[in-house]
Image (cartoon, rainbow, N blue to C red):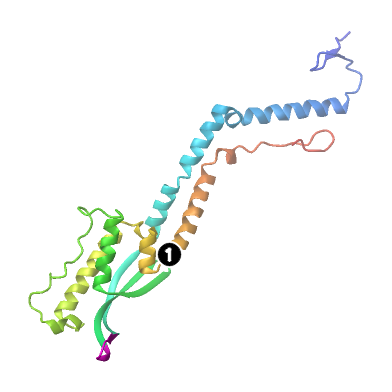
Amino acid sequence: EPEPSRSTCGTMMDPEQPMDPQSQFRGGLFFDVMSHAQAFADVTTDEGAARFNMELLAAAKPADAEEAVEKATPVLIEIIDAVVRKETLLAVGDGIGTKEHVEYIIKITRGLLLKTLGKRYSELQQFHQILLEHKLIEKLTCPPFPEKQTFRDGWYKFDSTDTNSNFIRSRKVSLDTYLKRLFEENPTLYHEPCVIAFFGIEEFELKAAEEVSAAAAKRANQHNPIASLEPTTKPNLSGLYDV
């Protein structure tokens, strides 16, 4: 005579007696819970959770995402022209007068974004000093700003507002070289508030922030250990899925 089987709870079961569906349901649920706990043991324990958080943060470091974005879409800057501007002066006793000065037209691009603006030599010189004062660039290693007297030889006073003169052309080339080196050697400089305000490139920073956030989120998803652990769920005898 066959020996009666035992249930998982230790009680005697008659092999000819039909199995209680509820007991099968409880057994299936218990099995699924234990399987789920075992599959996610690496993150449900204290040590596993700490390790998981460190791996997740390391995989989605904002610095790495920002560096990737800067390499993919760098800021390009150049001086494309020099123009003469007139400013109105109010002199006591002499009425209203005008004075001319030269502005250098700067073109800044980043991807599809474009910004053009005019800056005087004195404004660019002041901008350079602000970068040094805020320690955004190092005095010993940064590109030198063109000295005011560098082009003094071989020109006369009236050349200072003549955009076709050798003086203006030479200064334009020198300033162009300075700005290109500045942004090539400091690719994240345009994120600084003083740089944004000086060039009026708020839209550049907004677009870059969106790209960095998207890149960090994508990298986190790619390195998320949970994404690859998708437990297989099966319906129980009642046709329901255990959660």
- Indicate the quadrant containing the N terminus: top left, top right, bottom left or bottom right: top right
The quarter holding residue 95 reads bottom left
* Residue linked to disc 1: 204
The mark total stands at 1
Does residue 55 appear to the left or right of 128 in the view shown?
Answer: right
Residue 79 visible here: yes
Q: Quadrant of residue 196?
A: bottom left
Can residue 185 be seen in this snapshot? no
Point out residue 53 in the picture as x, y percentages from the top left corner: 52, 36
The region drawn magenta spans 89-97
Residue at the (61%, 37%) spot, across then down: 229
Please check the rendered image and state whether residue 90 is part of the magenta-colored stretch, yes or no.
Answer: yes
Q: Quadrant of residue 94?
A: bottom left
User: Can you say which quadrant of the picture contains the C terminus?
Assistant: top right
Give x and y (percent) for residue 61: 45, 45
How packed mark 1 is, by other alpha carbons closer than 10 Å (few <14, some 14-19, many 20 or more), is: many
In depth, the one of 24 and 215 nearer the eye is: 215
Task: Give me the residue at 43% from left, 61% from top.
Answer: 205
Image location of residue 63, percent across then percent down: 41, 48
Residue at (77%, 38%) from the top-left corner?
Answer: 241
What main secondary structure does the magenta stretch of the protein show? strand
Q: Amino acid at mark 1?
A: Phe
